[in-house]
Amino acid sequence: MNFKDILKSSIFYILVTSFLENLYYLIFNIQDYLEAGFAQFLFNSFVYSILFILLLVRLLNRMTKKDSYSFKEILGRAFSMIVFIYVLDYLNAVLFHYLNELIHAPIRSEKVGFENLMGMMTSTFGMPTFAIIDGLFRNPFYSLLDAISLLNFNMFYFNVLYSKIISTTIVIFYYSLYVLFEKFDRKGIEAIIPIKNNLTLLAITHKPTWWILPLLIPVLRYIPKYYMNKELSKKYQKKFIFAIGMTVIPWLFYGQLILNKEITEKEETI
């Protein structure tokens, strides 16, 4: 999958999401998100995140069908799509900002204080700023820290899903499990089923089924995880330090181990 295909996927994402959303708001002259009404259920971050995940899975699936590929290549394509989407989304916002100025010429309030501040925060066609580092890294990171400090799990999961960087790492991990399970004649769909995916990993690594109990306990679960990953890393002729990486940063090390044609061709039976 070359960069032209990734650009096409990024354009498709923008057209189906923010372009349609802004076009709807422009046609009906909605100047404030709070006035969108039912449209908020049609155009929302959750739907956009699901679409992004589907496009990312499509990208991974097409790349792993190639005769030769590397994990670095997969990462490069995945993060290129994220950058393309961010840039296109920015250009789309700029376009509709000026279209709105041209067509509706909204009257700006000269009020100051809380009402004006809220108007600025919920403005539909405000002039965007190009801050890619903040948009992709800092803002999601600080939002997650806020959610953790407040023990707000709904806010935490929302930010995980909303952040394209974080959701990409999650997709890479579970797609790696999907590919791994299929290599061992298991159902790939088991990779995304809670508990079942750990039971399958236990079977693949020939570990006792009762290990599922400590695997369900936070922090303690890393002990059996390490020994499971150690068994998998042996198969790919990796040292114990790689098993530690698989346990601590699973998306990165599972991706290097599984989503890498050069390595998988050398695999041996456990």
Image (cartoon, grey):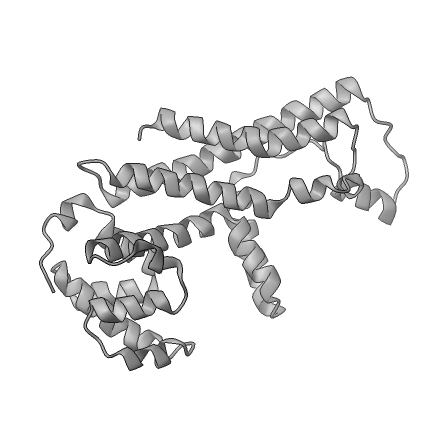
Is residue 108 visible in the rendered image? The answer is yes
Viewer-proximal residue among 165 and 205: 205
Q: Is residue 77 left or right of residue 47?
A: left
Q: Residue at x 31, y 31 (%)?
A: 1
For residue 206, above or below residue 65: below
**Snapshot quadrant of residue 245:** bottom left
Q: Is residue 110 left or right of residue 257?
A: right
**Snapshot quadrant of residue 251:** bottom left
- Residue 79: % across, % down: 40, 40
- Residue 24: % across, % down: 70, 29
- Residue 57: % across, % down: 38, 43
Q: Residue at x 69, y 31 (%)?
A: 127
Quadrant where the C terminus is found in the figure: bottom left
Q: Residue at x 56, y 55 (%)?
A: 159
Is residue 133 visible in the rendered image? The answer is no
- Residue 153: % across, % down: 58, 66
Q: Is residue 201 left or right of residue 162?
A: left
**Snapshot quadrant of residue 20:** top right
